[in-house]
Image (spheres, coloured by chain):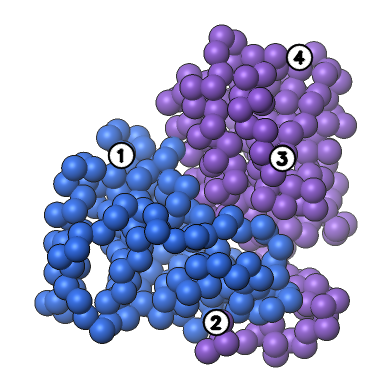
Chain colours: A blue, B purple
Amino acid sequence: MRLVLSDVPLPATLPQREENRYIDLTQRRIAQCMGCFGCWVKTPGKCVIRDDATEIYPLIAQSDRLLYVSRVRYGGYDVPLKTMLERAIPVQKAFLRVHEGETHHVQRRVADKDAVILAYGCPTQAEQAVFERLIARNAKNMAFRSWRVRFVEEAALAGAIEEEVRAWEAC
Amino acid sequence: MGSLLIVNGSPRAPRSNSRQYAALLRDRWDGLVEEYAVTDNRHAEIGARLGEFDELALVFPLYADALPAALLRFLVALEGAHGGKRPRVHAIVNCGFLEPMQNHVAVEMLRLFCAQQGFEFGMALCIGAGEAILTTPFSFLVRRKIKAFAREIRAGRSERLEVTMPLSPAAFVGASRKYWLRYGAKNGLEPQQMDTDEIEGS
């Protein structure tokens, strides 16, 4: 499966494929994680908040190609995508493992991913550097076997999204 | 001794480990202290009162390798909401992993927030094994570091302190498994249920 998760509306011209899923977070109802650990110690693999996130995190788990589109806020994801990623912790177990010399959560049935992050609203090199460090951390915790950050102007986003999705066609 | 505002940035503020770390900091502060939890959703009011404080300590857990969205919302609300005098900003960030360095990106994010919004960044304390350390014989290590953290704030320093359990990664993984199994057992869960690979039942 291939997944696009975006905090901006997506171009209508993206190719319609059975294996492609396009999620516009601005059109979804996703509450903030309560930090209750219910998805680990009460209903393992399921969030206790039953909103649109429960449809999205299984798609994140199944995807082997991932495109995240997000404004950058203080060198990290802005609120919409960050809120969704926090709601995706049911894809992990409470238990830890040693991975690349560090402790990290054990994944449930999560596909390894080639991830591209389209980041906008991030004009300075200092902020870009922190964002890239964040994605390098995500790679260890979110099963990215490869990752690439592409910084773009907001005005160029639609074209960049289209380019990245069309590049999947060649794979 | 100056005045200190402690902001609990955990989405489960009333029941959080951050609340306990905040309480330890409060105990080590001799001046005026006020606490605010981001779950109280009075961001604009707190933003308007920031100038009343000399120091602002953000106490929060690491979520998905970064600042929790709940804290992010608070910081966004502060943009433009504060005028005049600005407190120095400090951070106590805890993660459930053994390595305090996993918190470093969150600290760098706060430095960026400060640079962009005209605040001075001061002290950071990165806590590893933060979910459980206060319930272990190693809790004294955290108490000692929070004492040092408060002292360095008073001295006007800007440094990054770190603390964790003195265990090997393998030993920590084993200990944390027991911790989580006990947690699940309280809800009637068997180990194999917690260990399921299923997500949303499939």
Please name which of the two marks, 3 or 2, marks the residue nearer to the observer. Answer: 3
- Where is residue B79? Give x, y as percent: 49, 27
Question: At label 3, which amino acid type do we have?
Answer: Asp
Q: Chain of mark 2?
A: B
| Residue to which mark 3 is pinned | B40
Residue B35: image quadrant is top right
| Residue to which mark 4 is pinned | B2
**Separation of disc 1 and disc 2 at Cα?**
33 Å
Contact check, label 1 and label 2, Cβ < 8 Å: no
Nearest to N terminus: mark 2 or mark 4: 4
Circle on res. B47: none
Please name which of the two marks, 1 or 3, marks the residue nearer to the observer. Answer: 3
Q: Secondary structure at mark 2?
A: loop
Q: Secondary structure at mark 4?
A: loop
| Residue to which mark 1 is pinned | A121
Nearest to N terminus: mark 3 or mark 4: 4
- Disc 2 and disc 4 on one polypeptide chain: yes
**Separation of disc 1 and disc 4 at Cα?**
37 Å
Question: At label 4, which amino acid type do we have?
Answer: Gly
Contact check, label 1 and label 4, Cβ < 8 Å: no
Is B195 positioned to the left or the right of B115 in the image? right
**Separation of disc 3 and disc 2 at Cα?**
32 Å
- Disc 1 and disc 4 on one polypeptide chain: no
